[in-house]
Image (cartoon, coloured by chain):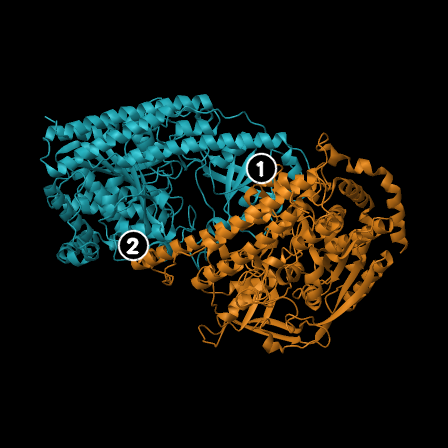
Chain colours: A cyan, B orange
Amino acid sequence: MARRLFSILVLTLLTGVLAPVAGPLAAADPAAAPEPLLGFTAESAAAQRELEASLDAMVSTDNLRSWMERLAARPHHVGSPWGKANAEYMAGLFRSWGYETRIEEFQVLFPTPTVRVVEMLAHARHGVSVAGKIVIARYGAAWRGIKPKVAAEHGAIGCLIYTDPEDDGYFHGDVYPKGGHRPPHGVQRGSVSDIALFSGDPLTPGVGATADAPRLTKEESGKLTKIPVLPLSWADAQPLLEALGGPLAPEAWRGGLPITYHLGPGPATVRLKLEFDWSLAPAYDVIAVLPGAERPDQWVLRGNHHDAWVNGATDPVSGMVALLEEARVVAELAKAGHRPKRTIVYAAWDAEEPGLLGSVEWAEQHADELREKAVAYVNTDSFGRGFLGAGGSHTLERLVNQVARSVPEPKTDLTVAERAHKAVEVFGNADRFERAGDPPALRLFAMGSGSDYTPFLQHLGVASLDLGFGGEDDYGQYHSIYDSIDHYVRFMDPDFAYGAAMAKTAGRVVLRLANADLLPFEFGALAAEVGIYVEELETLAREEREETEKTNRLLDEEAYQAAADPMKIYVPPERKDLVPHLNLAPLKNAHARLAEAAAAYAEALGGLAEGAWPAAATLAEVDRILYRSERALTRSEGLPERSWYRHHLYAPGFYTGYGVKTIPGVREAIEHRDWAQAEEQAVIAAGLLEALAGEIDRAAELLGPARP
Amino acid sequence: MARRLFSILVLTLLTGVLAPVAGPLAAADPAAAPEPLLGFTAESAAAQRELEASLDAMVSTDNLRSWMERLAARPHHVGSPWGKANAEYMAGLFRSWGYETRIEEFQVLFPTPTVRVVEMLAHARHGVSVAGKIVIARYGAAWRGIKPKVAAEHGAIGCLIYTDPEDDGYFHGDVYPKGGHRPPHGVQRGSVSDIALFSGDPLTPGVGATADAPRLTKEESGKLTKIPVLPLSWADAQPLLEALGGPLAPEAWRGGLPITYHLGPGPATVRLKLEFDWSLAPAYDVIAVLPGAERPDQWVLRGNHHDAWVNGATDPVSGMVALLEEARVVAELAKAGHRPKRTIVYAAWDAEEPGLLGSVEWAEQHADELREKAVAYVNTDSFGRGFLGAGGSHTLERLVNQVARSVPEPKTDLTVAERAHKAVEVFGNADRFERAGDPPALRLFAMGSGSDYTPFLQHLGVASLDLGFGGEDDYGQYHSIYDSIDHYVRFMDPDFAYGAAMAKTAGRVVLRLANADLLPFEFGALAAEVGIYVEELETLAREEREETEKTNRLLDEEAYQAAADPMKIYVPPERKDLVPHLNLAPLKNAHARLAEAAAAYAEALGGLAEGAWPAAATLAEVDRILYRSERALTRSEGLPERSWYRHHLYAPGFYTGYGVKTIPGVREAIEHRDWAQAEEQAVIAAGLLEALAGEIDRAAELLGPARP
C-alpha cells in the first residue's frame, strides 16, 4: 500500500513535466493539427487527450516490477496455493483502488500428472508388430494439441512431443543462462485438449463450470486427448530420435540437432507410463468493475490471465502487471473526476493455460448479459520488448491505429505506430502487416485462438483485440520452468519500459472505448479484409484444382515412380477427385455490399466532423448497432461440426489449433474437399455479411444528413 | 589384358541379343518413326543408329569396376607416383586399343603443405588489438577460393574454411560408414587460387607450362591466395566456432552444428602455422587420337581428369573409367569398319584439382591448332546415380537432347531424357531445367568453371559440354579421404549402371559429332538463352535501382536505426549513388537479329530433310562456320580485368568462382555498379552476337534452296 500511494504522489508531481516526455511524439509532425479522434467530438477529444497525457504520466514501472516479484515468486498454476493467493492479492488491489471486485470460482477439470516415465528399452526387437506405436513429434507448425489428435486418428497409442533447438533453442541465440533461448532441458508444457472442438472446461461445454453445473463424463467430453501425451526437452528426445530407423525425414521436418533425422519406425522400444489425478480444480477469476457514469449498461472488457505453468514471469505476469497498472491509473483518474461514460470491467483470468478455462467459463456463465452489454474485449497476455503487434476485430483497426499513433515508443523518438511501420519498411512483409493509406495503417491480424479473447470473439461475437510487444526479446522460456523473473529482466523487458507502454496502449484503447461519444468502430478495414479473404478462397480452390489435376496427370504418366529413387521405398500420392469450379459469387456480392455500406458509414462519420452531432438517443441507437456488429458475424448454429465456434469470419483451424482460418466454414470445407459444404457455407457467410451491411447502412442513415 | 580381350569376346557374343536390351526404349513410342538425326542424311542416320546399338551392347560394367579398382587403389594427386603410374597405365590401354597415344608432360606449380597446425589458445586476451585477424568461413554459397580472396581484400591474415554438417553431413543423411554423407572428420581439400583471374598453372598464364616455358614468380602471378588458408572438418571447427563472441550470425549463415552461431571476433586466440613445398610438379596428360577417315582436321575432343585429391574413386575415377570404356568401344567399332569421319581425341587430364592445370596447359600449348581444328569438347568428371545433367554451349543443346532421347535409362523403362523430364515434372523447376517444346527439351545449364571444359570453352571458344548423372547418390565424400571405392560402390553407383549409361551417352555425342554429314549444331536454343539473359540483365538493373532507391529513402527516414534493436550494435547500410537507366538496346537488337538468323538456319535444315543434300565442299564450308560459331562469341581482349577469359556469353563469376555469369561483361559491371562499363560491354557483346548472326545467315544460305 505504501508503495502504491508513493507512486501516486510521484505521478502527481510528474504531471507538470509531461510535455517533455511527450515531446518527441509531437516533434514527429509539429505543424499538423491533432488527428480527430474516432468517436469523439472536438471538445471531447481535447479532454480525452488530456486524460491520456495523465495516464502516461501516472504509469509507474516500479509497480510493474514489484507486482511481478510478488506474482511470479512461486509456481501458480490453476489449483495451486500461490494461484489462489495471487487471485486474492489482486482482488485486494482492485478493491483498494475502488473497483467493485469479486472472485468468481469455477470447478474445472485439470488433470495433473502423478507418474511420468519414458524409457527407451534396448534395441532388442526388430520389426516386432504391435497393435500401435508411440509417436514422437516435433513442436511447431501446427499447435501442439493437433499432434496427438492426428496421431490418435492414425492409430497411435502414445505421443511424445519435443522442442527442437531450431525452433527456440541454440539455433536462435545463446541459451539460458547465458542468453534467453531454451536450454537443453527446457520442456514446453501445454494443453493438448482438442480446442478446435470447443474451448474451456472439457466437461461443461457451453455452460459455466459452477460447482453444481451439469457435467459430461471424461469419455463423453470428446475434447480430451485420446492417447497419453508427454512433452520432452530436446536433451531427452535426442536418444529417441537417433534410434529412429525409417527413411530420411523430409527437409522441412529436420531440425537443429546434430543427428540425421529419420522417420520411424525405429528398432528401439519405448515404454511410456503416465498416470493422472483427474480431480476438478478451483479456478479463481478476479472481476473488477468500474460502473460507467452515463452508459453503465455498455461494458468495456479488459482481461489477462493470471495462472502460469510454473512461475510464469513472462507468461502471464508480464501482461498481468501491465493490466494492473493500467487499472490502478484508470481508477485514480476516475477518483480525480474522470469517471468513464461506459462501464469498465477488468478481469484476471485463472486456468488459461489448460485451455482458456477461466475466461470461457465466465463468458459462458454470463453469456446472456454479455451478449446484451459487452462493447468490446481487450486482451493481453505475455509480451516482451520490440514492436507493437495487434490482432482482432477489424472494426477496431482504426481505433488501434489512432492509439498507436499517440503512444510514445519507449526506446526511440517515435510513436509505437511509427516504429512498427519502420520495422515493416526495413524487414519487409508490408502486405501482411500493413494496410495502404496515408499514413499506412497497422493491419490487425485475424485471430485464431491461444488466449482469452476466444470466448468473447468466437463464441459470443464480442469485438476483441489482442495486444503485445515483441520481436526483440529472447523468447526461449515459453511454458517452461525457465520462465522466471531473472529471465524476464535479463532477456524480455529489462526496465519494464514495454510493460509501461502496454499500460498506456491498452489503457488508451479502454478509455477511448469507455469515453467516446460514439463507439469508435469503423468498417473500411473489415470490408478490405473480407475482400482479401474471398480472393484467398478463390486462389485456394484454384490451386487445389491445379494441384489435383497435376497429381492425377503425373499418376497417369507414372512420373512419380519414374522420378523416385529405385533404391528407396516410395509411395506415390493418391488419385483425387477433380475439384469443381465453386460458386463463390454470394461472397463476392456480399463483399461488394459491405464495402458500399462501409463507405457510406465513413461518409456519415466525415459529416460528423463538420457538423453538429446527433442527439444522445440517436447516438445510443447507433452505439448499439456498432457494438452488436460483431454479433452479426456469428450464428447460434456455429461452424460445421463445432457449434461452440459461432463466428463466421474468424476461427481457429480444425487442424491448426491456434492458427486462424478466415471465413472458416468455406475455407475448411475447401481444405477438406467438401465442395457442397463450401458452397453452403459461402451462402451462410454471405448472408451474415449482407445483414451486417444492412445494419451499417442503418447506422449511417441515423448519423447522416437525413437523420431526425 | 586378358580381362579386356575377354570383354571384347563377350561383347561380340552379346551383339546378337541387343534388341531385348533396347526393347524398353522402343516400347516408349512404338508407332513413331525414328526421329531424324540432326546432321545426318536418312541413310547415314540409319547406319549411325546401328553403330550406337553396338555401342550400347559392347559397354561392360566389369571394365568400369576393374579399372576403378586399379586407378583408385592409392592416392594419385598430381606429382604422386600413383598418378604417374595411372597415366602410363591408361596410355597403355589407349595404345592397346589402337589409338595414337602420347603423354604430354607439363611442369606446374603445386604447393604441397608440409606443416599444418591450427591451435586455439586459451581464452586469455579479450579485445586485444592485432594487425589483422584469422577468419573462419563456412564452405558453400560462393566457391571456396573466393573466401580467402575476399578475406584478404578486407585485411585478414589467415583463413580457415570448414564444412558445415548442414551442407553435406548428417543433416542430409547418415554419415560414412553407415551412410554416404560427410563424417565429422571429413575435410574438403581444394584449390583456393584465384581462378576468376585465369585458369591453369599460376606461373604460366596463356602459355603451356612446358619445362622451358617463361615463368612468372609466385609474387607476379596474382593468382595465388594472399593469405594462408587451411580447410577444416566440422569436428575441428566446432571449438573455434563456439569461441566466437560477436553478434548472432544471420540466419542464412548458421548451419547444422549444435551451437549458437556467432560472428566474430571471439575472445579466443588462434595460432595458424602453415608451411609449403613450392616445387613444380610434373603433370601427365594422356592424349589418344583416332584420326578421322574423311575430315581428319576436324577434331572432336573428349576429356576427363585422372588426378585426385586422395584416392578419388568418385572424383575423378567414376568419369575416367566411363571415358575409358567409351574409348575402348569406339576403337573396337573403328576396327570393325566404323572408322569415324572426323578425328576423335581422348584426353585424360592430370592436375585438374589444383586448378585445371593439365587441360589448361595443354589447351594453351596447342591453342593455334585447336582454334583451327577443334569442333567441340565433351567433358565428364565425377558423377553418381540418378538423373542426367548437362551443361554447355547451347548450339549443342539439340544434339544432347537427341542423344538423351535415345539412351536407355539404367533403372527404368525410360530413356535418360524421359526420366529427367519426369523428375522435373515431379520436383518442379521446369523453367530452370527445361525448354518448352514437344517433347520439352532438357535445358543445358550455362557453364562457369569447375572442370576441364573451361580452357576450351572460355579461353579458346570451342563449343563444350559437361555431362553427368546424379541426384540420388549420397555425395558426402567430396575432396576427402573418404572418396574411396567402398564409398562409391555403396553410395554412388553400386552396379556401375550409370557409369555404363555415361559411356553410352558421351559415346553417342562423340560419335555423332565425329560421323555427322553436317555438324549437329543448331542456334534456336542459343537465341532463346540470349533472350533470357538480356531479360535477366534488365531485371538486375531494375532491382538494383529499386533497392538503391529504397535503401536511400530508408536512410533519409532514419528507418534502419528506428527498426534496429536498441540493445544491440547495428550498422545501417551505406548510401549509394542512384542507378541510371542503362542502354541495353544493342543487346536487344542483337538478340532479335540472332533469333532471326537461327530461324533461317532451322528452315534451311528443314529443307535438307526433304531434299537432296549439298555437295561435300559446301557441307565442309558450313561445317567450318558451325564449329567456329563458338569462337565468334570470344574476343582476344577478353573480359574486363581478366583477359584470359575471352567468352562474352559464359564466364565464371569474379566473386562466385565456379558459378556462371552469363553475358558476364555486362552483368558483372552492373553488379559492381560500373554503369559506363556495363554499356560499353553491352555494345561489345551485341557486336559479337550480330557478327555470329551474319555467319549463321551465311550457313543458311549455303544450305538453302539458293545454294549452288
The reply to whether dot 1 and dot 2 touch (C-beta < 8 Å) is no
Q: In this view, does A597 lie above or below A137?
A: above
Kind of residue sitting beneath label 1: Ile
Question: Is disc 1 in the same subunit as disc 2?
Answer: yes
Where residue B535 sits in the image (x, y, percent)?
48, 49
The amino acid pointed to by label 2 is Phe
- Residue B603 in sight here: yes
Task: Say few, some or many: other residues with alpha carbon within 10 Å of mark 1 (under 14 / 14 to 19 / 20 or more).
Answer: many
Provide the secondary structure element on which disc 2 rests.
Answer: loop
Q: In the rendering, which numbered label is found on residue A134?
A: 1
- What residue is at 27 percent from the left and 26 percent from the top? A692
Mark 1 belongs to which subunit?
Answer: A
Q: Which quadrant would residue B231 be assigned to in this image?
A: bottom right
Question: Label 2 belongs to which residue?
Answer: A496
Q: Position of residue A313 (x, y in %)?
A: 35, 50
Q: In this view, does A630 lie to the left or right of A119?
A: left
Q: Mark 2 lies on which chain?
A: A
Distance Cα–Cα, label 1 vs label 2: 44 Å
Q: Specify whether residue A182 is in view.
A: no
Q: In this view, does A263 lie above or below A651?
A: below
